[in-house]
Image (spheres, rainbow, N blue to C red):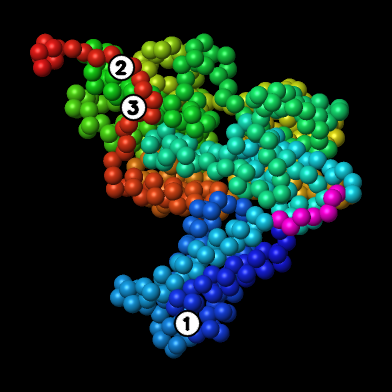
Amino acid sequence: MTLLRRLLSGVIAGLTGGLIVAVVTNPPWLPWAAHTVLLGAVLGLLFGEHRQSNGSALSVGLLIGLLDWVTWSLTLAPVLEGRTPSWTMAVAVARFPELVGAALLGAIAGLVLHALATWRPPGPAPRRAKPHIVIVGGGFGGVGAVRELDRRVGRGLDAHVTLISDSNFLLFTPLLVGVAAGTVEARHVSAPVRAGLGHASFLHGRVVSIDTRTRNAYVSAGKEGLLRVPYDQLVLAVGGVPHFFDLPGVREHAFPMKSVEDATKLRNQVLSALERADLEPDPAEQARLLTFVVAGGGFAGTELVAELFDLVHDVLHLYPRLHGLRPRFVLVHAGERLLPELSPKLGLYAQRKLGGRGIEFRLGARVSGATAGDITLDSGETVPTRTLAWTAGNRPNPLVRQVMQGPLVVEPTLQVPGAPGLWALGDCARIPDTAGGTHPPTAQHAIREGKAAARNIAAVLGGRRPEPFRFGGLGVLVSLGHRTAAGEIGGRQVSGFLAWILWRSVYLSKLPGAEKRLRVLADWTLDLVFPRDIALSTVSTVSTVSTEGDRHA
C-alpha cells in the first residue's frame, strides 16, 4: 500500500465514521468534517498497511478515538476558545458525551480502514516470472524481514515473498519468563504472522533441507508430505536451539526456555513441586522438592531465578504444611559475575539484590550432570533438586549445518559467502560489527537485521549494491523481581524501581500489535492487585498420604 493510498484510505474511513456520528450528534458540519479528515489521515498513516482482525481493528480505532478526545476535546478545543485546558474529573464528566462520540468515530473509522486495507482490486496478470524471495524462520529476524519486504512489494517491488515457519505466530521471547512465573498469559506473548502480511504469503511447515546449488528448499508440511519450494533469494533466520553440551542426564531432566510450551512446563513443574512438597512426609524429599536450580547467569537465567523466587513466595501461604519452611534457589553460572552483558557495577548490584533475598550463587561453576533427583557441578558438589531450569547454552539450528559447520559466518551485508542468493541473520549467524566483534543475539538486533536483509535483497534485485549492517544497540534492561531492574539506556546506568518501570514500558512498546499490548498491560495490572494463579494447566499424578482420620472421614 503506497503512502498516498494509506492517506486516502484513512480519510475515507474518517469521513465515513464522521458522517455516521454526525447523523446522531448533529455537530457543526465544517469543523466536524475537518476534524474527521485529520483523524482519518492520522489513522491511515499509522495503521493503513497493517492487516488485522476485526477485533484488533476495533480496538485500535477505540484507542485512537480516546486519544482524539483527550487531544481535541480536553486540550486543543479549550485553547482555541481562549480557555486554559483542564483535565480534572469534573471536566472529563462534562465532556463525557464527546468521549462517546470520539470512541464511536474511532471504532467505525478503524473498521472501515481495515476493510479498505484487506480489499485488493484485481490486477493484470504478470508478464514475466517474478523473483521468489523465501524467508525461513518466524522469529524476530524472519518476521522483521518479511514485513519489510511486504511493505516494499506494496510500494512496487516486483517479487513474490514467502515466509516458511513451523509455528504460525511470532513469539515475544523476552516475556517467556513472565509466562513461567505466571505474570503473563501464554497466549498474550504471541501474535499470528498472517495477520501482519498484506502481500507476502505464509507456508506453515518445517524446512528440512536446502539445496543451495539448485536453489530449492524442501519443506515438511504435515499431510502434504515434502514440498519443493524454489527460490531466487533465501533468508535463513531459524534461530538457535538449547545446547546441553552432551552432559549426562541434562537433556532428559532440564527445563529449557525457548518456547511457550517450555515456559508452561516449567511453571507446571514448580507448582507441582509445591503440591507434592505439601503432602511429602520425608523432610529430605520435601527439601529436594523445594530446591530450584537455574543454570546460566545471563539475562534469561537472572530474570528467571528472580521471577521464580517471586512466584514461589507469592503463593507459599496457600500451602499450610509448608509454613516455616524456606524454599531454596540456586543460580549456577560459569562466569565470575552475573550478567556479563552489563557493566561490573550493575552485575554486582544484581547479585547483591538477589543475594539479599536468599538466592544462592555458584559462580565459576558448571553443571556436569543431572538426574531426576539432583544435579552435579564440576566442582563435585551435588545439589538435591527436582527442578533444573536451563538457560546455559544455545547452538544454531541444525538446518544451518547443511551450509556450514557451526554458526554461519556472514559478510557485513548479511550474505553467506560462497552461496549466491543466500542470506543469514539472528541467532543462527555470526554478523561482524565495526569493532571487530560480532553483533549480539538479541531481539532488537534481529529485528533490524531482518529489515537490513530485506533492504539489501531489494537493492540486489534492483541492480544496486547491498549495504553493510550497522547498529549499535539502544540499551539493555534486566528484571530482578520485587519490582526492581537494572540496565543501561543510552549509555546511562539505571537500577531499582525506575529501571523496572522502564523495563516494562520498553517491552510493552515492542509487543507486536495494540491488542497484545493491551492484554499484557491488563495481565500486569491484575498481577499488582490479585494473587497469582496456581492452577496447573496439565493434570499431574500426585502421590497422596492417607491417615487414619482420612479413612474414617
Distance, label 2 to label 3, CA atoms, is 12 Å
Q: Give, as a single range, the part of the protein colored magenta.
A: 120-126
User: Looking at the picture, how far across and down is residue 130, in whole percent?
Assistant: 85, 45
Please, what is the dominant secondary structure of the magenta stretch? loop
Instruction: Tell me which corner region of the image, top left, top right, bottom left or bottom right, holds residue 114.
Output: bottom right
Q: Residue at x 43, y 83 (%)?
A: 78
Say which element carries label 1. Answer: loop
Residue 199 percent coordinates (x, y): 71, 49
Name the outermost residue toward the bottom.
82
Dot label at residue 542: 2
Quick check: marks 2 and 1 in contact, CB under 8 Å? no
* Left or right of 387 on screen, residue 415: right
State the SS at label 2.
Answer: loop
Give me the disc on residue 27.
1
Q: Is residue 469 above or below residue 215?
A: below
Label 1 neighbour load within 10 Å: few <14, some 14-19, many 20+: few
